[in-house]
Image (cartoon, grey):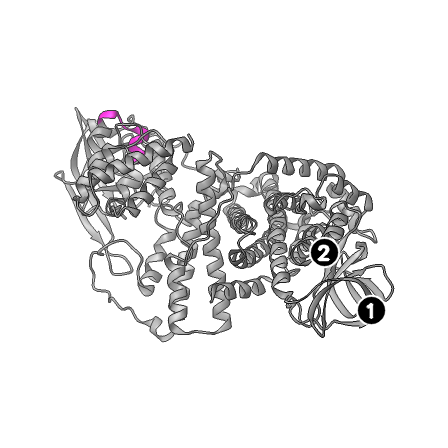
Amino acid sequence: MSDADYPRVDALVDELIAECPPGKTDDIEFWGAQYDKGLAWAWHPEGFGGLGLERRHQTRVNRRLEEAGASIENRYTNLLGIAMGAGVLDAHATDEQKRRWLRPMFTTEEIWCQLFSEPGAGSDVAGLATRAVRDGDEWVVNGQKVWTTLAHLAKWGMVVTRTDPNAPKHQGLTYFVIDMEAPGVEVRPLYQITGEAEFNEVFFNDVRIPDENRIDAVGAGWRVAVTTLMNERVAIGGSAIPRESGYIGQAVEVWRETGEDDLVLRDRLLELWAEAEAARLTALRANELASAGIPGPEGSTGKLAWANLNKEITAFTVELLGLDGTLYPGGYELRRPERIAQHEPHKAFLRTRANSIEGGTSEIMLNILGERVLGLPGEPRVDKDVPWVEVPRG
Amino acid sequence: MADPAISVPYAPTEEQDLIRSTARQFLAERIPIEKVRELMLSDEGFEAVLWKEMAELGWTGLVVPEEHGGAGLGWVEMSVLLEEMGRVVTPGPFLASAVMATAVIEELAGDEDKEELLAALASGESIATLAVFEQPRGWEIAAPATRATVSNGGWVLSGMKRAVLDAHLSDLLLVTAGADDGIGVYVVDAKGEDVTVEQESVLDPTRRQATVILDGAVSRSRLVSGDVVAGLTHALRLATAALASEQVGGAQRCMEMAVEYAKTRHQFGRPIGSYQSIKHRCANMLMKVEHARSAAYHAVRVTDDRAELAIAAPLAGALASEAYVWVAGENIQVHGGIGFTWEHDAHLYLKRAKASSLLLGSPRHQRDRLGLALGI
């Protein structure tokens, strides 16, 4: 561990910047070189985009690269691949699979998406119904997925399927990487309450997946899915952002611009400011303790905290706008969004409603905190030891 | 807005771990909850022998520099100790003397006074408390109505101070008063002539307070006069940060009590903690406690940066106060009928929580200070 590795990492960063000067090098070429030097995911083994170090080294690498003017846009363009897919491959894939997929994932030459949720399987994702049936060296997939971010741009999808309907729900699942360009894959935009379609519905109609694209064992899909979800929740709630940034920064800006001086609104703004700062400090503390090898409960609250806060802050900001709060500047014309980033207040008010649903509802997050962190007993599960086919659905 | 630079790590040092384990052991042995209950019903609310033992452990001089007979440790170490004290609603004048009075002397006194007073406080020989709040001004300390006048070559004080913590146990009062040359901080013998200490009947009987009436009381020395408001404000921010750690300790304990009970109490054939209504309540407790902890830990780590402490202290004060009051209340609710009884310990925490949230500024008042520091 430890800071002893900093000089080595710094030297590699210097080398990368010297060989591929940011601004003068094509982004894809730069990211490829970054991957080859092990500076993509520093905690991955050497040869797979990493150096076998701790995660915090990557934070340092990213900061130094940003300072040097290098683009880290790939982390947004291919968010699901780089933040979640890579972790899944690192933990569960064969070396051959990692060699095939990791590098083009990092360079954004191949975009990734995640196909878990279904119309009938939201919080209870282990109850999903998309079927995969073995046919020689291939699997034939039929079913429907929803809430699939980036599916319309993706080359690869991480998909969980049911391969044994007669086993209890957690045991009959298998995880694959599916070619989103394969025959039988249909992607339709799913328009949201904002009028935009960040997400998609994805239909599989006799789609064939070669068995070499299976991740981990047949029947081990739930284990792999859990790794994906853990990475997702860290990605959503675990980053340490600057003070007064994001939606609380926007609220403060609107407060100043409108010249509002009502004392009740001011107290509410400060209350939200304090809560946002506490959530931010908690992420900082959690990241520091995690990199010092001291895991604690503070790392588990971020996603839940930000879901609540983003909703409350954006609702407050629209209120601050008074009569202008009744407008919707962009209009509701159905369209694809340009980029997933911070929205203007009205759209933010609507978009943040999803924060307590996507990546695990707040109710599920509270269950996880209660059961895994506090050790409270689970609820009786009537479907636990029952063959999946016999579980009531609807 | 620039982020504050934090150079003090969150991972505990060996010394901090030692302070924590020593405190937990001492408090469990010497002031278990039965003892807290006994003291809370006594006239004095505390016992001198316990102060002596705390002094022997180095607690009374924890943040007093070594040159003045203290342990020379910092506010992070203080927060570790206070968190432990908060866990078990430790009674006594520790907050008043070892935190608040010490911070004021450290900040405002000249070398001679420091030498004499800090040594006496650190050794446990003296107990001091702040007499700075008055009604109707409450937590605004900038313009005391208490007056200091010259008489026989010395200073005499007249006025009424409220919410003077543990004044009945104290030897020294640090009194704010206005004189012709501005506001000063005066040292008065608490048991001297023309000083009346009226112990109040208080919401939280584990932390006493008094109304102090000064009727021409002679001051033994004047610590400072002139521009004292900035220094006093800074000292009270240190106290707010320290108190926040005590509040986090109490809130953490309330959460633990609720979770323990939710695991064992059965209704309708299963543990109540298996119901989402109770489980989610407990999970929300965890989140509030962790957020308050983050704010409190941050505040005691930036005490050398005055501008940042002006943000961090009211932030910690507001969050820790609200979290503790809420968690202490929810703990009673999770316990149901038994939680409302005198016999159960839950009410000790609720009382400590509510009173603490109003000692140095209500959450709303702390947010006002936060807003002033942020320019909002």
Report the chain holding disc 1: B
| Image location (x, y in percent) of residue B85 | 67, 45
Report the chain holding disc 2: B
Residue type for callout 1: Gly
Give left or right: position of A283 versus B210: left
| Image location (x, y in percent) of residue A233 | 38, 43
Q: Which of B140 and A80 lies nearest the eye of the viewer?
A: B140
Residue A166 in sight here: no
Query: Which residue is disc 1 drawn over?
Result: B153
Of the two numbered discs 1 and 2 on the same chain, state the one appearing first in sequence: 1
In the image, residue B211 above or below residue A381: below
Distance CA(mark 1)–CA(mark 2): 41 Å
The magenta stretch is A86-96
Query: Which residue is disc 2 drawn over?
Result: B204
Estimate how packed mark 2 is, as few (under 14), some (14 to 19) or many (20 or more) residues with alpha carbons within 10 Å: many
Q: Which of B210 and A130 lies nearest the eye of the viewer?
A: B210
Q: Which of A211 and B301 lies nearest the eye of the viewer?
A: B301
Q: Nearer the viewer, mark 1 or mark 2?
A: 1
Give left or right: position of B317 versus A76: right
